[in-house]
Image: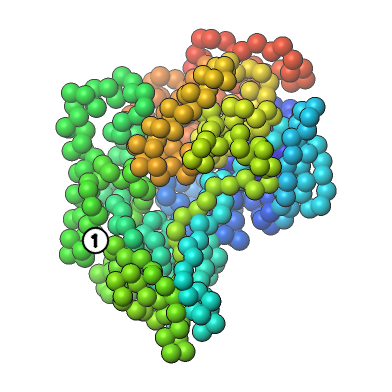
Amino acid sequence: MRVGIVGAGVAGLATAKVLRQAGHDVIVYDKAPDVGGVWSRTRRYPGLTTQSPKAQYSLSDFPMPRDYPEWPTGEQIQAYLASYASHFGLDPVLRLSTEVTSAEPVPDGGWAVTAAGATEHVDKLVVANGVFCEPAMPRYPGEAEFTAAGGQVLAGTELHDAQQARGKHVLVVGYGKSACDVTVPISEVAASTDVIARHLLWKVPRRIGGFVNFKMLLLTRMGEALFRYLRPRGVEKFLHGPANGVRGRMVNSIGTASVRQFGLKRLALVPPGQMEDIVRGAIGLATEGFFEGVEAGSILVHPGRTIARLLADGDQPAAELDDGTRFPADLIVCATGFTQGVPFLPASVTARLLDERGNFMLYRQIRPVSVADLYFNGYNSSFFSPLNAEMAAVWIAADVAGAVALPDPQAMRRQVADQLAFMDDATDTHHCRGGKIIPFSLHNVDEVLGDLHVNISAAVRASHWLVPVDPAAYRRVTPAVLGRLPRDDFVGVSAVAAAPEPVPGPAPSA
C-alpha cells in the first residue's frame, strides 16, 4: 500500500521505517527543512536537552553514539535521528520543506493529500505531527504599544540563540522544563532575567542526593507502578492497597530530597502539595544551573504571578504583573506549552476525531474509532517516547494487514472514553488533549503488544522492575511481528496467534 506520513520527527521516522520493512510504499512530509520534529534546528532553543537519559530515549535497534552525554542536547538528538533515517534508507522517501495543507478522505478509500501545491493519493494516512506541534502563545493587553516601543514577544521555540537576549531585560513566562532550560543560557548574557511562574512545579533532580540517577527510581516498572493506573495489575494492586502508605512515602521522599538538594525553602520555591502530585502538572527534570542561578541572583522567580499587561513605560518596553509590579522588558519568551492540532484535516473529519471537550479519541493512542484509513503516532508522549512510537508503528503495520483483533467500535469508544476520564483525574486534565501518557508509558507498551500477542520475555520485564527500562530489549519485536504478516495480499488475513509470544532480548543495561 501507499502510506502518507505527516511529520518527520521520532514517530514519523519510526513509522516510515517499520512500514517500509513491511513492504509498503511510504511518503514522509514535513514542513521543516530537516528531520527531528521538536529537535529540528527551526525549533531548538538554547539549553534544550532530553528529559530522559540517552539509553531510555533511544530507538530499540539504533543505540545513540557512545560519546553522547547522559542527557543529549537538542542538536545531538537531531543528528541521531538524521543518522537513523539514513541508516534505514529513509532519505529517498522524505519530502522536507513540504507542508501538508490538506488531507481529504476519498469516497472509495484512502486520502487525497495536498502538499506544495500538488495532490496525490495514499491508501493510508498517518498523522505524526506530534503533541508539541504548535506553541500555545498567550495574548497580552497592550502588546501593540509594547512592540512599537521595541519590545519583542517570542515563543520559546523561536529563540534559537541566546545571543538574541544579550544585554536585554528578559521575562521568561512559564516554569516547566522548557522555561527553566531556556532561562539558564539567557541569564548568562541578559541584563536581567525574571521568570514569571503562575504555578510552581516539582522538579526531579537528575541525580537524587547528588549521586543516584533519577532513572534508577522513576524509569523502572516499579517507578511507574508507584502511580495508580486505571487497570492495576499484580504488584500494583498491593502497592495501592496494603502497601499504600509505604508507596506514598517512596514517591514523596524524592520531593523531600529535591527541597533539600536545591534549597527550595531558602529560595521560597517549594511547590504546593507533595511530589506525588507531580503527575497532575508536569513531571519535570530539574535544569542544571537553574536553582544555582536563583541562588546567585542572576535569575529571579516570581511565583504565583502572571503578566497583566504590556506597555511602554516612557519610551521603554515594559510589563506589568497582576500585583502591579512593573519590569523593564525588552524580550518576553513564552514557554507556555503547546497546542495539539491537525489543521490539514477537514472539519468533518476532526469532528469525528474529538470528544466534546476536544480530546483525541484514539484507541491505544493510535487508531481513531470512526475514521477509516487513518492512524496517529506520537500522540503518546512519555519518558520513553521513541519506544512508545516504535511499538505503535508495529501495531499500525499489523492493523494495516488486518492482523489486529479489534473490539467492536462501541467497545473501542467506551474504552477510549474510560481512559480519558481516568487521565483527566490522574493528571488534572494535563494530558495534551489525550496525547500524553506519562507516567503510564509502559502500560501503553504492554497494551499495544498485548493486542499483537507478543512481548519481550517475562524475565527481562521482571528485571525492568529494578533497573531502568532498556528499549534495546524490544529490538526483536518488530521483525517478530512483521515476519508473521503477509507482504502482498491484505484481504482475509486472520488475527495473529492468541498465545503471547515472548521475544528474546538482551539483558537490560543500567
Q: Is residue 369 above or below residue 95?
A: above
Q: Is residue 87 above or below residue 170?
A: above
> Residue 233, position in %: x, y?
33, 21
Q: Type of residue at label 1?
A: Leu
Q: Residues within 10 Å of mark 1 (few under 14, many from 20)?
A: some
Q: How is the image coloured?
A: rainbow
Q: Residue at x 36, y 59 (%)?
A: 175
Q: Is residue 270 above or below residue 466?
A: below
Q: Residue at x 49, y 17 (%)?
A: 502
Exactly how many numbered labels are in the figure?
Answer: 1
Horizontally, residue 118 falls left or right of residue 357, namely: right
Q: Residue at x 64, y 51 (%)?
A: 35
Q: Residue 1 is drawn in which quadrant?
A: top right
Q: Residue at x 76, y 31 (%)?
A: 110
Residue ID for mark 1: 269
> Residue 427, position in %: x, y?
36, 41
> Residue 5, position in %: x, y?
68, 40
Front residue of 323 and 33 = 323
Q: Name the quarter where the C terminus is drawn.
A: top left
List the single residue furthest toward the bottom: 314
> Residue 314, position in %: x, y?
43, 90
Horizontally, residue 292 falls left or right of residue 341, namely: left
The answer to whether residue 222 is seen in the rendering is no
Front residue of 155 and 370 = 370
Circle 1: element type? loop
Front residue of 79 and 279 = 279
The answer to whether residue 99 is seen in the rendering is yes
Front residue of 389 and 312 = 312
